[in-house]
Image (tube, helix red, strand yellow):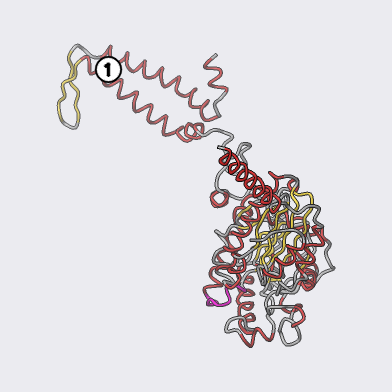
Amino acid sequence: MKKITGTVSILLAAVILITASGCGAKTSPENVDVKAMAAEIIASGAYTDSMSDKTAAALSLYSIDKADVSEYDVYFSSMATAEECGVFKASGSEAASRVLAACKARQASQVTAYENYVPSEVSKINSAIIMQSGDYVLYIVSNDQSAVKTVLEKYGFTVK
Amino acid sequence: MILASNLASCGPPEILSFFIQIPLAYLISKTYNQIKRSMGPISFCHFRGMKMKYSRSGNYILVVLVCIVLVVVSAAIFGGGAKKSEVPQNTSLAGSENPVVTSPALTAAATAPPKTSAPAATPLPNNGKPDVPEMKKADDDFFSDSVFIGNSLVDGLYLYGGVSTCDWLSGTGLSIYNIAAQKLSDKHGGTCTVMSTLGAKQYGKVYILLGINEIGSSIDSFSKSYGEILSKIRALQPSADIYVMSLTPVSAYKSAHSPYFTRNNVKAFNKALYKLCADGGYWYLDDYTPLADKDGYLPSSATADGVHFVTSYYPVWMDVIRTHYVART
């Protein structure tokens, strides 16, 4: 009986440890300098097009409610490519879900726009980094996603 | 009270009909009594040579027939007024206070352009030349009654041109062949089609740039489709000055390495657009010449892919638009 109790205790402890370590790995990045990270992504060499910071026009193009974001920085291409870099800090977890949905909608509309126009851009759009981590939401279409991932990991994002 | 309220709700034709029907009813009654008095219990009448037995009950049939004839005549005279009164007075597809929410595309197709007090569209000069003259540089307010329609180049103009006072109906891949159905961002957080927006709002100036995505198609097909779209736009925007913007130049490299995006093709399409404008009464805004180098190519410093502009060149293009317009009458 004592043996069984001991084994159960060890198993429980292991489960608690594993769970705790798992939680630790899922920690979301905090206090990210949105503008600095976006600028670093653009400078990473991942883009073939000339990119410009046009944050003012972004929310309307993405159909994002201004109240849903507290900070954001968005770079657009010259329109020759679908390359884009959007970094958003949402104003809460529910707002973050809405921003993520808007980014997915943006991806879908870009696929529609480019598939008969510049089909080679569609693979870029389909491999976009679209993710939510805490209150942060990203929409990144580039020519070299591994270079983008390196920057994101530096800022505490885990990209699958 | 009911009669008064019914009269009050009637229009002039209905009131006239009412006052004519009173003497008619009196005449019917009088006729009936005269027939009744003049006929015995059994009589005969001649009808196309046939003798028909006519009984006392036939009096009633005759009266009913006379009544029907009078009613039919009355209805024929005043039917128009009665029909009109069946339609609610405030029903209007275009200007209802409580519009039915429906598909924007359907609304645009079904809705006549709202009446506007805006000045009429500026007609082409007597010589029929559609060229837009060079003018003093317009400020942002000039574009407050404008809408820009077009492809990815116009998307770039929206992002980098520096004008935010107007509406934008642009999208990557937009062409003359898909413009009627293509869903676009309305740049205000929603989606729309070009025609749905033009059907819902009146503009003073409509700028349209299409053609570079269609450059692989035949010029005849392009001109025909463009002409049809311009007619639809004119119908929806009767008071607007419609500026058809020329295709912008392509780079020398692009022209040399692409079967379609060549300088000669761009020039040929622009020639077709010019004719379309002259024939249809639209303004032809030549932005090809000011944006091209002396050889007719887009400068290599102004483009990355030979067609689209680098971001710093969009304001240069916008300046061409700012300095080319017609003074509204």
Using the rendered image of the protein, determine whether residue A140 is visible from the camera's viewpoint: yes
Kindly tell me whether residue B238 is visible in this rendering: no
Please state the chain letter of the residue tagged with numbered disc 1 in the rendered image.
B
Of residue B17 and residue B86, the one placed in the foreground of this image is B86
Left or right: B139 with respect to B55? right
- The residue nearer to you, when weighing A35 against A113, is A35
Left or right: B26, with B264 as reference point:
left
Q: Which residue is mark 1?
A: B60
Quadrant in the picture for residue B24: top left
Q: Secondary structure at mark 1?
A: helix
Report the span colored magenta: B212-220
Q: Position of residue B293 (x, y in %)?
A: 76, 84
A80 w.r.t. B53: above or below: below
Residue A5: x and y in percent read 59, 39
Which residue is located at x 61 percent, y 77 percent?
A: B269
B120 above or below B157? above
Q: Amino acid at mark 1?
A: Tyr
Name the spot of residue B234 as percent of width and height, x first: 62, 59
Q: Quadrant of the N terminus of chain B?
A: top right
* Foreground residue among B35 and B149: B149
Determine crowd level at label 1: few under 14, some 14-19, many 20+ residues with C-alpha closer than 10 A: some
Res A56 quadrant in image: bottom right
Q: Is residue B307 left or right of residue B319?
A: left
Q: Tell me where residue A153 appears, x and y as whole percent.
A: 73, 62
Where's the C terminus of chain B, which quadrant? bottom right
Total number of numbered discs in the rendering: 1
